[in-house]
Amino acid sequence: MHGYSKGIYAARKKMGAARIIFALWVFAGFVLIGDANPALSRPGRKATESKASRVRNAGFVCVEGVYNSELMAPYDVLQHTFYRDSTDYIRCFIVTPDGKPFTTFEGIRIMPDYSFQNAPRIDILVIPSTRTSMTADLKNKVLMHWLKRQVAQAEYVITVCDGAFPLAGTGFLDGRTATTFPADRQRLASMFPKVNVKFHQNFVVDGKFITSVGGARSYEPALYLVESLYSKANARRIARGLVLDWDVEKIPHLIVSKR
């Protein structure tokens, strides 16, 4: 049973149909884009990188019950960086413990690109929320051990919604500032008292860690990262392509420190 209260759990279940429609639209987009571009097709695939290129690997770690929006929104944003410069972009892929197909909370069946055993170097680690982010994921020794290793070496770490809980479970958020899904902020503060939890920001940047509220706001941490790595103009161009408004100054956020 997911750690939400029964009321919140029921509300999210009612939202399922609407989120499936949204997610199918997004999912179709990145699947079709991946097939159309060799650099973005399934990574058993060969990456088309030259020595002069700067291609960052973004690994999205998933388990059963991951939420559609929290996985697909940041994936959609980051993979679009390919179109600004095909030699300097973010290459996205999905990683699971065993590399086997999994089902999202809303019911979409997804084939991951890699398992923990064969995943390439991850420069940008993305931890989307799952149904069990606050419970079983924290007790999953294989998952948590892998996360600790990846968090330690990643250039950036993004958590979306309750993805902040597994990150906090690694100990890397101790002494840092973070946020999570609004209804679960107090729980994050209670479970991990060494984390300075913020209650009024959509996302928080503390060094290489970008934690965020998720839901329909799941695009925001990814757009912020694009703006930080490339430029405000590039972030706005990607946002326009997704029919989104992007002006970070108009979004409640906190930058404690930048990498």
Image (cartoon, helix red, strand yellow):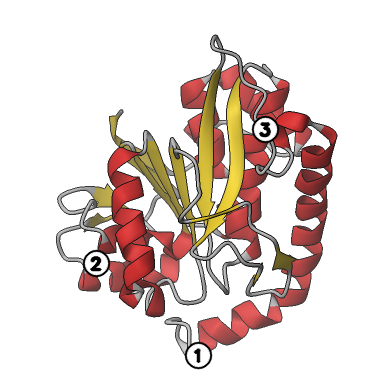
In space, the residues marked 3 and 2 are separated at their CA atoms by: 43 Å
Q: Is residue 39 left or right of residue 31?
A: left
For the residue labelled by badge 1, is the local secondary structure a helix, a strand or a loop?
A: helix
Read off the residue under disc 2: 189
At label 1, the amino acid type is: Lys
Lateral position of residue 159 relative to residue 259, left or right: right
What's under tag 2, amino acid-wise?
Answer: Ala
Q: Are marks 3 and 2 in contact (CB under 8 Å)?
A: no
Q: Give the x, y percent position of residue 227.
A: 52, 25
Secondary structure beneath label 2: helix
In primary-sequence order, the first of circles 3 and 1 is 1
Placement of 190 over or under 27, stated as above or below: below
Question: Percent x, y for residue 232?
Answer: 56, 20
Q: Residue at x 69, y 74 (%)?
A: 106
Q: Residue furthest top?
A: 52
* Number of the label disc, if any, that sits on residue 46: 3
Mark 2 and mark 1 lie on one chain; the one further toward the N terminus is 1
**On the picture, is 222 further left or further right than 159?**
right
**Mark 1 highlights which residue?**
6
Residue sitting nearer the eye, 95 or 28: 95
Q: Closest to the observer: 123 or 166?
A: 123
Q: Is residue 253 left or right of residue 242?
A: left
Q: Is residue 222 above or below residue 72?
A: above
In space, the residues marked 2 and 1 are separated at their CA atoms by 20 Å
Q: In terms of image quadrants, where is residue 220?
A: top right
User: Looking at numbered disc 3 in the image, what kind of residue is underneath it?
Assistant: Lys
Label 1: few (<14), some or many (≥20) within 10 Å?
A: few
